[in-house]
């Protein structure tokens, strides 16, 4: 290999990156110290859902690489999700300014550079920053992800799952932190001790620890990240009127001191997409490319359940048309089971200042195919804006390793002006839907016998609370057992009698004024899935009261189906 001439090395790269379909142009190969614009390095657009890794030491150009790839994905009509931790990626909305230095660089790469801006949707967690507020309900977030934020141990995480199970079973909606706190307080109270005993495996002491951690979250101001209206992750799949993919840029600069929160929230978005999207198979281009920046924060100190959930999501979401790119400093930041699924590799320079750095360097080199480069030397000497690349070609085989001078972005490499961001947010079609937090009837109000605090219009798309049908609970339970046995083809697991827990009685609902039904958004996901179909069929034949009962039964019986690999559950799927 070392005896190859420069021409032979170039021929290997040119042949390896000669592709038939649409591609993302990454840059020009560097061979024997010289840039060769005739040897273009590219990534097949159809292989972007095979996932990838962008790694490198701080300051080597990882963020600029994301910026450049996001621009080309948008141009190809592929929506992109980016987490903007430092605020630099908002520059995608502003055309860059040319210069002599920039022109010289792009001409050397064979890049036809042109200043452009791109369609950007600015998002912010809970409205903490400039952007459309992104919130999740507690029940949707699920016990595994919430345990991650609360830093619970395995035993406490299992106990939290029992608490969620209790709330699900008893139709106690967990919308925000006060709802979960109310449920835990009820279970640890004198009137709830019988329910606590029935759960099994949940001690009062463990419930008390979880309650204290929950209060700590509230004291840290994290309650604004949970609530309604819940963000619909289908919003991430939009295209602009001109056909370009919308780049959803989640602003996170104020959350740098809460790394677990933002990394776990990103995983919730991904898990929600995973549960909602149908199987797509092999596509000409992905439905979405999702960049997980600071990926090491996902895995540091993660529980076994959390790691297994990430691995499962990464392995299976490919078939739903979503590509995930992990962005971190070294490949060793990513567990082996996940790393083995990342076919597209963009490795920026590494530093070997310490023995630990030297180990990381050797480990990184071992993950690349055999090449014409001395990778240990190449990775420690690569300049800013250069990276060692290998990707999956259209036949599913790795391309030759190529040291590459990366292309320059065509929009501003830095933050956009505040007035541009604010005007973009104000003009967004999502502002009316998500801009105002609401507090609907949920577990807190039910357990305390209070009406919901009117904080705004009802959250769009949520079903009304079903009115009582007048049937006795015994009759409903008997019918539910019969239907369950017909659906599942096995004896019912429901008890022969299920007396309702003695909660404080909620106030009688106030009749809502009659109004014309609103047309559902065209892009809204279909509700309820299999049990929704069952409810629809039975409801038409047996009446609305039974339809509501069947839907409620579906929520409880189908919990394993409705809750995803992270224990997540969306009200849109219930």
Image (cartoon, helix red, strand yellow):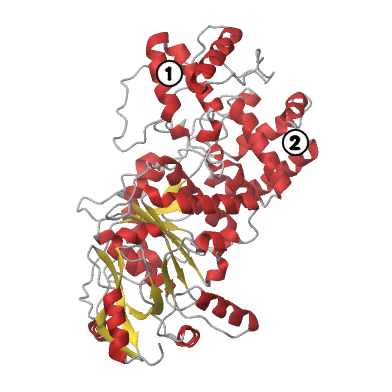
Q: Residue at x 49, y 18 (%)?
A: 550
Across and down, in percent, residue 208 comes to 76, 40
Q: Which mark is residue 148?
A: none
| Residue 109 picture location, percent across and down | 26, 82
Quadrant the N terminus occupies: bottom left
Secondary structure at badge 1 equals: loop
Q: Residues within 10 Å of mark 2 (few under 14, many from 20)?
A: many
Image position of 143 with respect to 322: above or below: above
Q: Residues within 10 Å of mark 1 (few under 14, many from 20)?
A: few
Going 53% across and 53% down the picture, which residue do you hit? Answer: 310
Task: Name the image quarter holding residue 396.
Answer: bottom left
Q: Is residue 216 visible?
A: yes
* Closer to viewer: mark 2 or mark 1: 2
Instruction: Tell me whether circle 2 and circle 1 mark residues in contact (CB < 8 Å).
Output: no
Give the percent coordinates (x, y) of residue 460. 39, 33
**Residue 463 showing in the rendered view:** no
Q: Dividing the picture into quarters, in which one does residue 323 lie?
A: bottom left
Viewer-closest of 280 and 519:
280
Identify which residue, 23 or 13, lies in the foreground: 13
Along the horizontal axis of the image, is 153 left or right of 378? right
- Mark 2, residue position: 202
* Distance from the alpha carbon under mark 2 to that under mark 1: 40 Å
Image check: 87 left or right of 261?
left
SS for tag 2? loop
Q: Position of residue 31 (x, y in %)?
A: 34, 87
Q: Is residue 43 above or below residue 567?
A: below
Is 154 above or below relative to 353? above
Question: Image height check: is 457 above or below 82?
Answer: above
Asked where in the image residue 188 lies, by quadrant, the reply is top right
Residue, x 36% and y 50% (percent of image)?
Answer: 321
* Residue, disc 1: 512
First in residue order: circle 2 vs circle 1: 2
């Amino acid at each position: 290999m070392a005896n190859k001439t420069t021409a032979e090395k170039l021929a290997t790269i040119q042949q390896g990156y000669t592709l038939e379909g649409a591609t993302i142009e990454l840059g020009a190969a560097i061979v024997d110290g010289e840039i060769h614009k005739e040897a273009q390095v590219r990534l097949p657009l159809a292989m972007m859902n095979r996932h990838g890794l962008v790694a490198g030491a701080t300051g080597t150009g990882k963020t600029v690489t994301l910026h450049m790839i996001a621009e080309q994905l948008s141009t190809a009509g592929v929506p992109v999700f980016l987490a903007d931790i430092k605020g630099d990626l908002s520059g995608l909305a502003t055309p860059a300014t040319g210069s002599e230095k920039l022109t010289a660089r792009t001409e050397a790469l064979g890049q036809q550079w042109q200043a452009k801006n791109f369609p950007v949707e600015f998002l912010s967690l809970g409205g903490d920053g400039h952007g459309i507020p992104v919130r999740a309900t507690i029940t949707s977030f699920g016990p595994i992800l919430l345990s991650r934020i609360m830093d619970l141990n395995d035993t406490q995480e299992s106990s939290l799952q029992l608490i969620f199970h209790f709330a699900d079973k008893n139709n106690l909606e967990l919308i925000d932190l006060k709802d979960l706190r109310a449920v835990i307080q009820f279970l640890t109270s004198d009137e709830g001790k019988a329910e606590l005993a029935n759960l099994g495996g949940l001690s009062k002491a463990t419930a008390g620890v979880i309650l204290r951690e929950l209060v700590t979250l509230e004291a840290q101001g994290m309650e604004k990240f949970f609530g309604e209206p819940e963000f619909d992750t289908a919003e991430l799949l939009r295209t602009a009127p001109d056909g370009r993919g919308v780049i959803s840029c989640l602003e996170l600069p104020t959350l740098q001191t809460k790394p677990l929160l933002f990394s776990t929230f990103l995983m919730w978005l991904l898990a929600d997409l995973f549960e909602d999207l149908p199987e797509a198979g092999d596509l000409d281009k992905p439905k979405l490319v999702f960049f997980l920046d600071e990926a090491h924060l996902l895995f540091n100190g993660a529980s076994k359940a959390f790691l297994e959930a990430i691995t499962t999501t990464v392995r299976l979401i490919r078939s739903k048309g979503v590509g995930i790119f992990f962005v971190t400093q070294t490949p060793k930041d990513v567990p082996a089971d996940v790393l083995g699924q990342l076919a597209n590799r963009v490795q920026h320079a590494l530093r070997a200042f310490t023995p630990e750095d030297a180990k990381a360097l050797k480990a990184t080199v071992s993950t690349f195919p055999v090449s014409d480069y001395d990778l240990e030397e190449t990775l420690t000497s690569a300049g800013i804006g250069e990276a060692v690349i290998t990707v999956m070609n259209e036949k599913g085989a790795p391309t030759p390793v190529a040291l590459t001078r990366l292309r320059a972005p065509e929009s501003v490499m830095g933050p956009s002006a505040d007035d541009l961001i604010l005007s973009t947010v104000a003009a967004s079609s999502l502002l009316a839907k998500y801009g105002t937090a609401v507090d609907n009837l949920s577990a807190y109000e039910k357990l305390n016998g209070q009406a919901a605090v009117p904080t705004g219009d009802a959250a769009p798309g949520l079903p009304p609370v079903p009115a009582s049908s007048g049937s006795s609970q015994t009759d409903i339970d008997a019918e539910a057992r019969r239907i369950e046995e017909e659906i599942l083809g096995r004896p019912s697991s429901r008890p022969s009698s299920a007396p309702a827990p003695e909660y404080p009685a909620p106030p009688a609902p106030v009749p809502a004024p009659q109004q014309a039904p609103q047309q559902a958004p065209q892009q809204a996901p279909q509700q309820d899935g299999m049990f929704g179909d069952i409810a629809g069929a039975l409801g038409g034949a047996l009446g609305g009261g039974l339809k509501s009962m069947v839907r409620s039964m579906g929520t409880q019986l189908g919990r394993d189906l409705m809750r995803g690999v992270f224990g997540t559950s969306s009200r849109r799927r219930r």
